[in-house]
Amino acid sequence: MADRYLNFTGTAPGRLLTRRLGLPQPAPLRRWSAEQPGFSGQLLHFSAGPSSYRGELSELLRRTGLDVRGSLSGRGPEAARPVGVVVDATAVTGPETLAEVHAALHPVVRSVATSGRVVVLGAPLSPDDHHQAAVQQGLEGFVRSLGKEIGQGRTVNLVRIAGPVSAAESTLRFLLSPRSAYVSGQVIEVGTPAGDVAVPDDWAAPLAGRTALVTGAARGIGEAVAETLVRDGAQVVLLDVPSAEADLAKVAERLGGRALPLDITAEDAGERIAGFVGEDGLDILVHNAGITRDRRLANMPADRWSSVLDVNLAGVLRTTDALLKAGAVRRGGSIVATASIAGIAGNTGQTNYATSKAGVIGLVRSLAPRALAEHGVTVNAVAPGFIETKMTAAVPLFIREAGRRMNSLGQGGLPVDVAETTAWLAAAASGAVNGQVVRVCGQSLLGA
Ligand code: NAD
């Protein structure tokens, strides 16, 4: 559904009027396009404290093709507008070095280009050093606050480096690109992959040679996920309920994928998927299928409760178990499940939906370390906020308008934003990202 307010504020009179009235001024977000797949321009790289990563990180950032610099070039109106700033705060261990984060960003933050990126690198919280833990936790508050005030479609995220810094390349490339347009205020931990850090032959096709199964792919977010995975080089199997077979076949034909009409709640869904993909198996499993059946708990009959729990949680648990048991998700593979900010914040009328989506988060957190150790497979979740789909178009006008604006970017996300995040998590190069729940919500105020 068109966001008329965003279109209006994009015009000169719209900007003038909304500024006069003190209304929100969302900036059109720069997303991936075939003509302009990445940013170009300056990337500032600063260190706070004596980081041991400086040289390696600088090399890594240069490989993105951006013009990496240690200071802003030019002064006053002549100053460059960097497309991004990376502040390496991994060596911040006390309040004195924390001040260096302020010192790095304070003079340049205003200059960051529209739709630009700020990425702060942090370290895991030390259980033995409460000074280190205090200031590293402090970075979360810093990033979330800057994300709320920075405006102009710019995003701010924190990446905790818990393994080799080289394992963070895919994550940094994602966050420093238009692909992460609707991801802000997030804390993402990057650990150690099961084997060597995978480096794709071509970063423009990081999923080349991988086979993915996407559930709920006949429309909406699932269709966008399948399309984005294909763009990034994957072969896709598209699954949806038999009643959506005609739409599913159209999507499969358009994307050169294979359609599998199947209800994910079937007892033997996992076995049937394993049979369909055969010996080749899968590299990527995207649990996207989901339903809502809203009612306040006092008015919610048992069948409304159970239908949502069956599709959104029980079906995900059962098929995941069956596919892992059958060895149908190959080593180096990725499972990406779809949660929701409703599963984090809760939502009136959605006790069933929020329970199921919080359940998905629990599944990810528990299974991720075991799946990596036993199967060499990562397990992560995306948690979409307000995404412009048929689901949200059905929401009453005022609630819809509130949902759209109640985030730092002042607008709803698009299905492609969830798809981009899924594609990043699905790449072999992201093998060090495990057990993470990444919100695609424009830093929604809900559950923040
Ligand atoms: P949608 O209703 O447009 O699409 C969901 C698809 O899942 C449909 O094609 C449907 O047929 C399929 N599906 C439903 N039950 C199924 C089953 N039993 N077996 C197989 N397929 C089944 O929804 P969407 O907006 O594209 O949402 C996709 C996912 O994102 C869902 O998990 C949803 O909960 C989640 N999500 C959406 C939003 C949003 O703002 N739209 C926000 C948070 C989370």
Image (spheres, rainbow, N blue to C red):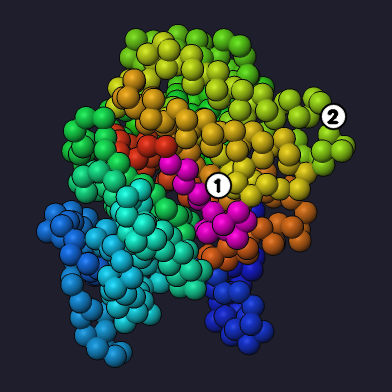
Q: Residue at x 21, y 62 (%)?
A: 66
Number of labels in the image equals 2
Q: Residue at x 26, y 38 (%)?
A: 192
x and y, in percent, of residue 131 in the image: 34, 61
- Queried on whether the Cβ of the residue with tag 1 lies below 8 angstroms from ligand 1, the answer reads yes
Q: Nearer the viewer, residue 193 or 7?
A: 193
- Which of the 4 image quadrants contains residue 69? bottom left
Secondary element type, mark 1: strand
Question: In the picture provided, is 257 more to the left or to the right than 97?
Answer: right
Residue 314 sits inside the magenta stretch: no
Q: Please say if the residues under marks 1 and 2 sit with CB atoms less than 8 Å apart.
A: no
Q: Nearer the viewer, residue 375 or 425?
A: 375
Residues shaded magenta: 436-448
**Residue corresponding to mark 1:** 384
**Residue corresponding to mark 2:** 301
Secondary element type, mark 2: loop
N-terminal of the pair, mark 1 or mark 2, is: 2
* Residue 174 appears anywhere in the view: no
Q: Please tell me whether residue 197 is drawn above or below residue 44 in the rendered image.
A: above
Q: Overall secondary structure of the magenta stretch?
A: loop
